[in-house]
Each structure stands twice: as structure tokens, then as C-alpha cells.
Image: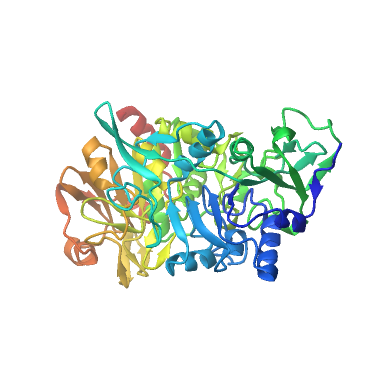
Amino acid sequence: MKSKIITAQRAAELIEDGVTIAWTTSSLLGFAEEVAIAIEKRFLETGSPRGLTVTHSTGCGDYPFGDTKGMNHFGHEGLVKRIIAGHIGQAPRLGKLVSENKVETYLLPQGVMTHLWRQMAGKKIGVITKMGLGTFVDPRLQGGRISEITTEELVKLIEFEGEEYLYYKPFPIDVAIIRGTAADEKGNITMTHEALNLEAMSLATAAKNNGGMVIAQVRYIARAGTLNCRRVKVPGVLVDHIVVAKPENHLQTAATFFDPSLCGETVAPLAAIPPLPLDERKVILRRAAMEMSPDSTLNLGIGMPEGVANVAVEEGVLEMVTLTTEVGNFGGIPTSGPDFPATRNAECTADHSFMFDFYDGGGLATGILGLAETDADGNVNVSKFGPRVVGPGGFINIASSAKRVVFIGTMTVGAKCAVQDGKLVIVEEGKKKKFVKEVEQVTFSGIYARKIGKPILYVTERAVFSLDADGLTLIEIAPGLDVEKDIISAMEFRPRISTALKEMPRELFTPHWGKLREIMEKNAYEK
């Protein structure tokens, strides 16, 4: 039997100019860092490979904790011709080339991309879905095209039986670079110490069925036939080459070499999760948590929404809901910071595309997502900020498919606030308003949501807004604040003000809350 084990240097030498390379990744979870280092090194030394198309479904890099790993290795002019991804915000070196109009760039919904891999594996027509209608990936806006040199259409608007859909076209994958924990000599891959399964099987199949090549990075090699078949996630017939990585290039997350509670080997005690300090951020998280119902399934977005899990633990209600992450984990506690998007104490780790089957089909009761910009129509932008382009990630799928969506964020950027005596005090106003006349990019379409009657809330430390037929309506205000002075003046437009305007619960602004279980039980009764 010919050995499939090669060096990372040899793997890089096998990459030809102009090919399309697909990567498994989420942040640095599941990413073949050793192979990426070797490709970058070869390019800097020889000028090859060049003109690559790189594609991955979600973010890939170490930003904001660094700017040297993941897709940052490809931030060299000439190395990459085109990017097709769900998110590039974690790779600022590559993002700089995009903003300089030096790379053709398509940013598409993460869930659509995971389904596209599966369709490509079976040589099917592509993905036809409502996900993305009314957002910047809709061809009537940008069609997902980011840089000026990006001209080819990958997304089309179609009509089927009187309804609008978006059609996402497939494209050939020449090389799939995947990652696992161990491989046997035949190339069978396990993922026992990986925090996620991601889309390794779909990508490997898509590449092989296109006559392409599959390279797998692993930590360990086993004798042929010794791996438990139930643990093998990618069969050896799909794997051409195996690269054994150095430990430092095969971290479980961006910050952690190995934590057994992130892959189901142990269960970490909840007491290890400290309560959050009482500040405006905690007020927002508590108010968002009030929208949860018992026995419901939720998604918490990256950034501030991750903290809802901390509130649930502190309030002793974690067992009443099932938290999920779009990359495949059900249950447990989603991590934050450089460990995101791993999950501690997950109950199930599914393949990436299967989770979006669940989401897109309406399995999510509530999505709690970040808010960077909002306008009077309820549109939300989280994907583009001036010259910096980050992409939608799973935001479009989650916001479109969840039965209820709660967008959360501070009212302005950089404001200094204090929580005192059951009230909010604005010490210093922020320098930039988030509630603007027109969002820079439509990542969530409030217009489309109003059309289909989806319930939407926007929660800040100062106020809560609902999305109604006429646009944003102010429905709650923090105790101690004035509507005109503290809310309207912090916005670029005037929202409708509810005739039933009320105070946000004062208990949210006190050190010890203890009301969440009661509120959730009431939500279940009212439902």
C-alpha cells in the first residue's frame, strides 16, 4: 500500500496556479494551518502558486487576537485572484486586498455555502432558497459582489410557482483541504478531538467528484483498519494525501490546544463560568434573555450575544433552553472570545450543513444577534463598515429563518454609561450613532421581515424597539432617561413612539436579578 503521508511542503508543491481551493474552517477551528503556512512560504519564495480562488463558508483567521493565521496567510498580492466566502473579517490582511480592489470577492450566506458544497458533491444544480432575499446578496442590490472588479454573477433572482427565490450557482473545486484528529494509513479520518465536524465530508466529495484532490491535516497516524468505523467522518477513498501537523499548528480553537469539554470527553462544571459585571452590556443581555421561552431552541450570535449564555447560567435557567451554534453544536454553553465558536458540554455535534437544514426549515425559536447599524426600515448591517468588509457569516440564515429575532447592541459607539440605583446614567455620549438614516449594507432586510410579518426586537441599554408595519417603534425606555434627550438625540431618524411606551424593568439595572425563570414561565403560558 502506497503511503499517503506527505510533508506540508510537498502538499504546497502540489497546488497549481489558478486552482480553486476549498477549506474547512470556523475561526481557526478545523483549519489546516500547517498546510496554509507551507503554501504562503512557497509563494513568497517562488511566486507560486498564484491566481488562486479560495473558498470557505465562514470566518477564518485569528483577528482580533492577531493577524497572522488562517486566511491571513493569503494576504499577498498575486496569490489570490478570487474569494468566495461567508466571512472574511477575521483575516484583515486578505481583507486589505479586497478593500484595495485587488481581489474579486463574493460574500454569501454561510448556510447557503454549506449546502452548496453538498449540492456540488452530488453534481446537482446548485442551491435555490429564499435565504438572502432583500439583503446585499440579492442581485437587485449587490448580488454578493463586494469589490469593483467582481463582475460575474453567482446569484440569480428566479421565480418559481409565483414566489421569488435566489439561485446560487455551483462552481468546481479542484482541491479540498480538510482537517481531522487522526488518520489511518488508508486515509480514514476521525475528528474525536476536534471541536466541530464542519463540512469535511461534503468538501472532500465535491473535490473528488470533480476529479480534484483532497489533502487532510491531522495530528496522529494509526495503523490501517484500527479506527472505529463509527468515529470515521471522512472515508479513506476520498483522501489523497495526509499531512501530520506540529502541535502548535493544530490547535483545537484559536487559543486552546486541547480542552476535553469542547469535544465531549468531559463535562465542565457550570461553577467555572463567572457572573458578568453589572454594566450596560449586562442590562442588554438580561433584556434579550427575557425573550426566551422554556423548551425552545436558540442561536446566539458572535460578540455581545454570546453573553446571553452567561446570564442563563447565572439565573439558573440554562437547562430550560437548548442553545445552538450554526457550526453544528446543540446544547451546552457556547464559548466566547478566541475559543468561539466551540461549545462546552455540547449534547450533539452535527455536520455544519445539517445544522442549516434545521435552521432554514424553521427549527430555531429565537435568534439573538448583534446590531452594528439599524435604519428606520429596520434594516440591519453587520457586514460592512467603511473600507472594512467582513461578510454575513450565518447572520442572514439565522435572521431569515428564526421564528423570532432579537438584535442587540449599544445605542451609540463609545458611550460611557453607569448602572446605578436601578437606573441607567449616561456619563458621556458616544461618538457614532448606530441608528442611522440608511445602513451601509443590508445584511438583514427589515422591509422583507415586515412584508412576511416576522416579530423583531431591537434591544439597547437605553431603549427597546419593535419592528412594526410602519418601521421602528420605541416601546420601552430605561429608567432615569428622557425620550428626547437620551434616545431621539442619539438617532439619525425619529422612530414612531408607542402610545403604550413603558420603562424597561428596573430589576435589570440591579446587582441581583433573579427574575428570568419567572419571566420565561410566563412566556410559555402566554404562548
Colour scheme of this structure image? rainbow
Give how far across and how far down residue 99 sits, in percent: 43, 67
In the image, 242 versus 512, the foreground residue is 242
Question: Residue at point 42% right, 55% down?
Answer: 282
**Relative to residue 318, is residue 391 depicted above or below?**
below
Image quadrant for the C terminus? top left
Residue 102 vertical position relative to residue 508 in the rendered view, above or below? below
- The answer to whether residue 129 shows anywhere in this view is yes
Counting from the top left corner in percent of width and height, residue 210 is at 59, 38
176 above or below 83?
A: above
Q: Quadrant of the N terminus?
A: top right
In this orientation, which residue lies closer to the viewer: 163 or 255?
163
* Residue 86, image x, y percentages: 47, 50
Using the image as rendered, state which of residue 280 and residue 71 is in the foreground. Answer: 71
View extreme (left): residue: 499
One can see residue 289 in this view: no
Q: Identify the residue shown where x is 49% and y is 38%.
A: 116
Question: Left or right: where does residue 459 sit relative to residue 29?
Answer: left
- 463 sits to left or right of 323: left
Q: Position of residue 108 (x, y in %)?
A: 43, 48
